[in-house]
Image (tube, helix red, strand yellow):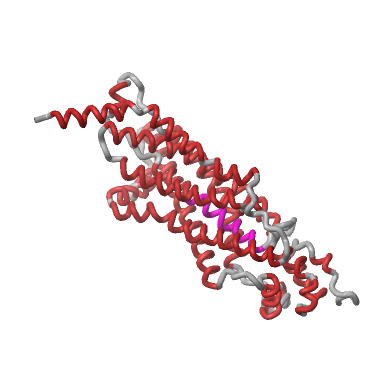
């Protein structure tokens, strides 16, 4: 029952458990539009959230786009030049190697930090610990971000083991006594870090499945034990009140978001399993060679790993696999910026301040974290500048021939 003076808006400020909140909302307002309107700001802020610039601010949002774009450009660069020979191509290969190494370090730690932050916030929301400032819109952004930040990491993990420097390169000629560069240790480090990232991604994936695919608790008899928390018509009044001036995500847009999230998540886990099979095959093969006996499991894993040769020999398959992470990340990035804009307009309609476009400490860090990619490529280019001179001498020598 409501009080004589109207609903008790103070009791609707905090949303910890959704079912309990809807019961309180019914008790205070009976879902009558006039009573809902009296607590409009309180209700909309509790259900849909204020804003969380740490995860959806302008700087980190641009950082997500930079990560996706850099990953694709570097991957295309590496695949284009890896088979080329000559001093000038070797100059490009050294630059690409330095850039890809730096990109992996930046992207993987960026993604790990985002996954940890996502887990912290989603656990608080899912278990009703605290949802201060975190509403449905921010939860959707967090779920999309937890996927987007992992996809570009697939590029360096897949391509960094690729040998860029061909035999008899100019660098090797200048340092004939230098021992060959070992790649086992960096590969193990990359595998360990990506495995950690995949493990951290598991909880956001579970939360995503529950959020996107679990039955809605709004509707006749959809609550616990067949209880009706709110009918679709009653909840539509709350939506209309909070988003009266906002173009919300349509049913089709929500489906696109959910489908791309689940497909991208499956791709991430399949890639992690593939890396695990490769690591297991290498370990077992080394043990078998040491003992002089080949086990059946080793043979099976090596046969599975042999499938890798199919895409390495097929150019079109390489192009498709190259574009998959970016194709999956594109719609998710669009939804992140779409949700940011929707949330901004909604808060302005409630006469609340939207701080997601303010440049704070975290927003600057979200972009600067990828600066080492450009810096390392610049230093690598400077260190290998003599290769350009060698290439120029070869060109002039060929022109001088009759």
Residue 316 percent coordinates (x, y) = 30, 55
Give the image quarter of residue 85. top left
Q: Is residue 297 visible?
A: no
Task: Please give the name of the residue rendered at 39% of the width and 36% of the height, measured from the top-left corner.
Answer: 97
Residue at x-position 43% and y-position 30%: 379
Count of numbered badges drawn on the protein: 0
The range drawn in magenta is: 136-151
Question: Quick check: is 186 in the magenta stretch?
Answer: no
Height in image: 18 above or below 97?
below
Q: Quadrant of the N terminus?
A: bottom right
Q: Where 402 falls versus 114 (above or below)?
A: above
Q: Position of residue 346 (x, y in %)?
A: 66, 66
x and y, in percent, of residue 27 in the image = 82, 75
Which residue sits at x=67%, y=50%? Answer: 120
Which of 1/49 is in front?
A: 49
User: Residue 149 in magenta?
Assistant: yes
Q: Quadrant of residue 28?
A: bottom right
Q: Quadrant of residue 279?
A: top left
Quick one: which residue is furthest to the top in this view?
A: 177
Which residue is nearer to you in this view: 345 or 272? 345
Quadrant location of the C terminus in the rendered image: top left
């Amino acid at each position: 029952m409501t009080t004589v003076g109207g609903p008790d808006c103070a009791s609707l400020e905090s949303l910890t458990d959704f079912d309990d909140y809807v019961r309180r909302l019914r008790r205070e307002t009976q879902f009558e539009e006039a009573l809902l309107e009296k607590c409009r700001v309180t209700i909309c802020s509790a259900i849909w959230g204020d804003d969380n610039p740490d995860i959806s601010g302008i700087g980190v949002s641009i950082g997500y786009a930079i990560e996706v774009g850099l990953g694709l450009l570097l991957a295309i660069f590496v695949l284009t030049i890896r088979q080329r020979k000559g001093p000038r191509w070797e100059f490009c290969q050294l630059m690409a190697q330095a850039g890809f190494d730096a990109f992996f370090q930046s992207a993987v730690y960026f993604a790990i930090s985002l996954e940890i932050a996502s887990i912290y916030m989603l656990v608080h929301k899912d278990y009703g610990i605290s949802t201060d400032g975190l509403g449905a819109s921010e939860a959707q952004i967090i779920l999309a971000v937890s996927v987007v930040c992992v996809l570009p990491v697939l590029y360096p993990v897949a391509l960094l083991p690729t040998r860029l420097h061909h035999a008899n390169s100019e660098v090797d000629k200048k340092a004939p006594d230098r021992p060959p560069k070992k790649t086992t240790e960096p590969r193990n480090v990359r595998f360990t870090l990506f495995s950690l990232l995949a493990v951290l991604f598991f909880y956001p994936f579970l939360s995503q499945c529950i959020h996107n695919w679990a039955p809605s608790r709004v509707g006749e008899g959809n609550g616990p034990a067949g209880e009706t928390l709110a009918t679709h018509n009653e909840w539509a009044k709350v939506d209309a009140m909070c988003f009266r001036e906002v173009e919300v995500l349509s049913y089709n847009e929500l489906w696109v978001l959910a489908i791309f999230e689940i497909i991208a998540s499956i791709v991430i886990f399949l890639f992690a399993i593939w890396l695990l099979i490769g690591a297991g095959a290498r370990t077992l093969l080394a043990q078998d060679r040491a003992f002089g006996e080949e086990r059946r499991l080793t043979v099976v894993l090596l046969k599975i790993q042999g499938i890798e040769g199919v895409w390495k020999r097929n150019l079109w398959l390489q192009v498709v696999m190259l574009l998959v992470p970016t194709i999956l990340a594109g719609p998710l990035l669009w939804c992140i910026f779409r949700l940011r804009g929707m949330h901004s307009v909604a808060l302005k309609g409630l006469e609340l301040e939207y701080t997601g476009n303010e440049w704070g400490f975290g927003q600057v860090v979200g972009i600067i974290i990828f600066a080492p990619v450009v810096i390392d490529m610049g230093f690598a280019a400077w260190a290998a500048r003599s290769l350009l001179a060698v290439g120029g001498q070869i060109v002039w020598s060929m022109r001088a021939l009759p």
